[in-house]
Image (cartoon, rainbow, N blue to C red):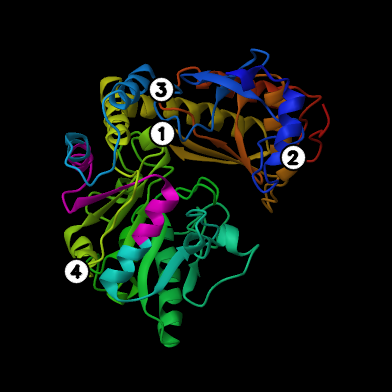
Amino acid sequence: MAADQRPKADTLALRQRLISSSCRLFFPEDPVKIVRAQGQYMYDEQGAEYIDCISNVAHVGHCHPLVVQAAHEQNQVLNTNSRYLHDNIVDYAQRLSETLPEQLCVFYFLNSGSEANDLALRLARHYTGHQDVVVLDHAYHGHLSSLIDISPYKFRNLDGQKEWVHVAPLPDTYRGPYREDHPNPAMAYANEVKRVVSSAQEKGRKIAAFFAESLPSVGGQIIPPAGYFSQVADPRVSHLLCHRHIRKAGGVFVADEIQVGFGRVGKHFWAFQLQGKDFVPDIVTMGKSIGNGHPVACVAATQPVARAFEATGVEYFNTFGGSPVSCAVGLAVLNVLEKEQLQDHATSVGSFLMELLGQQKIKHPIVGDVRGVGLFIGVDLIKDEATRTPATEEAAYLVSRSLRDSEWSGGVEGNRSQVQPALSSHNTLGVLFQFSEEMDMEEKVRSCETLRLQP
């Protein structure tokens, strides 16, 4: 707590001296010093209150008392590795299995989403005997070297695309090649995956996996068209579509749920379930939200995938993964989700947010698209309706202005404003009213062309 009393300027100076500049801050021009949080609120050193609208980690609210209590009580008794028998790890695996399709029944516990996705890549390669991976454009799957290689969002600014990585277009019906007026965008984007796979095979490459976030987040809060994943993955969808699918090419489907799972979409517990009840990935990765701030992650796989990995005879061991404390925290998060009916809450609050944002779209030409499901929402700001030119500076201005007014802490990626609050949020609606006021005030926004960039 002593560090919390240090003046903000001193903290910033120490950070600039001791912490790599690669470890970036939100709002670097005027960083926010957060010293405590509770529920949906965060507080700076002056006591100013912010609604946290990018809380895809504090899933059930910051410092939830039941989650804090579970960690504290287990820490007082035992915290060791998973090589000893303990009830928490099996209880947690059993509870997770109840949320997933029955085929996904083998679990591995880790500490971060990056660790989970790295293991998923290993599992896919051992099961298929192949090396290559198909990913979506703009994707980000983690910070390990293996994951930078399958993250176009990162590798295009580093070493470039490896020969074993194949990039398919993002299934974006607002900015992509097949838009909202296309008669069957799911099939059209699936055909693009087929084209990518065929091109790889012509070069003698063999596909191990199709790796995708169930709802691409860094790529722009994208909602893939219904049926897209099934057409990409499963040869049983139709005899006309079987040649298009990853499984036909010998690969497996990895659903990255690290940012979008655990009830965030409201109507389903997992975002991949938006693609239909018959769609089941071969591997699901989860992290961030499942520990509500505690480092917990998990990989769920089918029996055949897991057995192929086991057949190598190489042990998988993670020092802290699946510890009694981590599993106690994970169980507590599940208990809170159920007890407080947060999945239903995400549906109702998210629907109202989408309605309010839709009203802003009608009023303001700068709002080009509003998309989302549950409490996973994106707003695409544009300069011109015909060309859909991204309004990048305007988006940054709106978010930073609201932050300076101590209203809310939102996310912005290019021209897209992100809304991913804790599922327990109830005053998130206030964010939209503040957003509305920011846009309604004529001195701030008159049209797409005249949005002022100065306070």
Amino acid of disc 2 = Arg
> Which percent across, then down, holds residue 296?
37, 40
Asked whether residue 421 is drawn in magenta, I would say no
Find numbered disc 1 in the image and state the secondary structure of the residue it sits on.
Answer: loop
Amino acid of disc 3 = Ser
Amino acid of disc 1 = His
Amino acid of disc 4 = Ala
Q: From what the image shows, is residue 2 above or below residue 120?
A: above
- Residue at 20% x, 64% y is 310
Q: Which residue is mark 4?
A: 311
In terms of sequence position, does the residue under pointer 3 or pointer 1 come before the other? 1
Q: Is residue 390 left or right of residue 335?
A: right
Range of magenta residues = 92-120
> Which percent across, then down, holds residue 209?
36, 67
> Which percent across, then down, holds residue 410?
60, 31
Q: Which residue is mark 3?
A: 424
